[in-house]
Image (cartoon, rainbow, N blue to C red):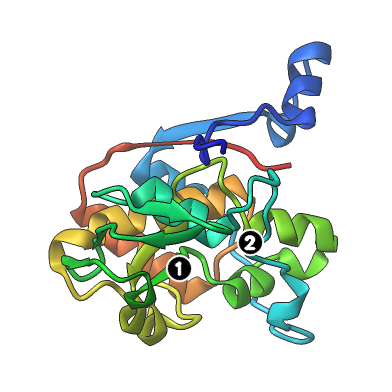
Amino acid sequence: MNRTPRMAATTLAAALVATIGLADPAWAASYSAPLQTAVAALPVATEIRTGYSRDLFPHWIDADGDGCNTRNEVLLAEAVSAPTISGTCTLSGGRWYSYYDNAYWTATGDVDIDHMVPLAEAWDSGARNWSTSRRQAYANDLSDSRPLVAVTDNVNQSKGDQDPATWMPSYSSARCRYVNEWVATKTRWRLTVDTAEKDALTSWASSCPNVTISVTYAY
């Protein structure tokens, strides 16, 4: 069974950029900038929820056909103690750390896989204009470690579809990491932010280390 769930993949678009040398920054293969610069670069647009359904983001697929779906691939990748794999990718005996609330868990049922930028928020921020195949790629993004994260189930449920203007992790030491990963995910998928979200991210970024945010764009 293949156990390399988050290997970086070279996309067709990135290959085209390298091959034909597209100079337009809109077609660049990657982006790297200090956190505050990355926040400032996020485009602002009004969010639109009309037409949203989770079913429009097919998720927890088994993209590589190894028997483990996306949820289990993330659990395997993020386990601090590796679980035993049996049958059709049944996991047992592992241990996971939820950085949102500084908690450890040993039962997979206590852990949710959070979409860093929730599916509804992604829809509001541009994914409503995507094809179903692109929304599926977003909902199962294993090529970057930041869009999907294993966290305590009830903490994930309390977050729901909120953005950083209305929800942040309860564990204060987690908040700068959370902002970094939110900004990286929005940048990677070229999603917009609304005004309140931009203001919140700007405020948080000003009080966090101005670390470099680097992403490979998803195409």
Answer yes or no: do the residues labelled 2 and 1 have beta carbons within 8 Å? no
Crowd band around label 1 with a 10 angstrom C-alpha radius: few (<14), some (14–19), many (20+): many
Dot 1 amino acid type: Asp
Residue 98 in the image, given as x and y percentages of width and height: 26, 64
- Which residue corresponds to the image point at 61% horizontal and 72% vertical from the top-left? 119
Q: Is residue 26 left or right of residue 79?
A: right
Element on which disc 2 rests: helix
Height in image: 197 above or below 84?
below
Quarter the N terminus occupies? top right
- Which residue corresponds to the image point at 74% horizontal and 78% vertical from the top-left? 55
Q: Quadrant of residue 38?
A: top left
The foreground one among 124 and 111 is 111
- Which residue corresponds to the image point at 44% horizontal and 50% vertical from the top-left? 146
Q: Is residue 190 left or right of residue 128?
A: left
Q: Is residue 179 visible?
A: yes
The foreground one among 41 and 82 is 82
On the image, numbered disc 2 is attached to which residue? 139
Crowd band around label 2 with a 10 angstrom C-alpha radius: few (<14), some (14–19), many (20+): many
Mark sitting earlier along the chain (2/1)? 1
Height in image: 76 above or below 129?
above
Element on which disc 1 rests: strand
Residue 164 in the image, given as x and y percentages of width and height: 38, 72
Q: Is residue 39 visible?
A: no
Cα–Cα gap, marks 2 and 1: 10 Å
Q: Which mark is residue 114?
A: 1
Residue 62 in the image, given as x and y percentages of width and height: 67, 54
- Which residue corresponds to the image point at 35% horizontal and 50% vertical from the top-left? 78
Residue 88 in the image, given as x and y percentages of width and height: 58, 59
Height in image: 167 above or below 172?
below
